[in-house]
Amino acid sequence: MRKSTNKPALIPKMYCNLFGHDYQVTKKVTYHVKEYTCCHCKKQLTTNSNGHLIELTPKFKEINAILERIYASRTERTKRKIMSSPAY
């Protein structure tokens, strides 16, 4: 007799169907782009260019990784620029 592996995943999906998803921020890409994950069913979302939540696909994961790298280098460059400027 085989045990079904779908039953543990059924309960969180049922909870989300009844009460809605409980999204929590899992990654802050920039100050306005974030990645979210439902703590019950593990569904992942991100914000698109219009600020709406959309499903996190491999394409958007790649976009967010590049955006995060650009944002980090830009903020680091700005910090260095402020630190090296003379105080008046």
Image: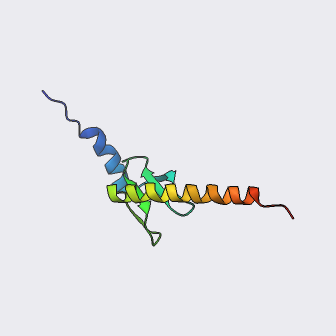
Residue at the (45%, 57%) spot, across then down: 66
Residue 57 image position (x, y, % from top left): 33, 57
Residue 30 image position (x, y, % from top left): 54, 59
Dividing the picture into quadrants, the one containing residue 4 is top left
Q: Nearer the viewer, residue 36 or 73?
A: 73
Residue at the (38%, 47%) spot, across then down: 42
Quadrant of the rendering where the N terminus is positioned: top left
Q: Could you tell me if residue 20 is visible in this image?
A: no
How many numbered marks appear? 0
Dividing the picture into quadrants, the one containing residue 19 is bottom left
Residue at the (56%, 55%) spot, across then down: 72
Quadrant of the rendering where the C terminus is positioned: bottom right
Q: Residue furthest right?
A: 88
Q: Nearer the viewer, residue 10 or 55?
A: 55
Q: Could you tell me if residue 67 is visible in this image?
A: yes
Residue 67 image position (x, y, % from top left): 48, 60
Dividing the picture into quadrants, the one containing residue 52 is bottom left
On the rendered structure, is 6 left or right of 30? left
On the rendered structure, is 9 left or right of 87? left
Q: Nearer the viewer, residue 66 or 20?
A: 66
Q: Residue furthest left?
A: 1
Q: Residue furthest top?
A: 1
Residue at the (55%, 59%) spot, across then down: 71
Residue 23 image position (x, y, % from top left): 46, 54
Q: Is residue 80 above or below residue 39?
A: below
Q: How is the image coloured?
A: rainbow
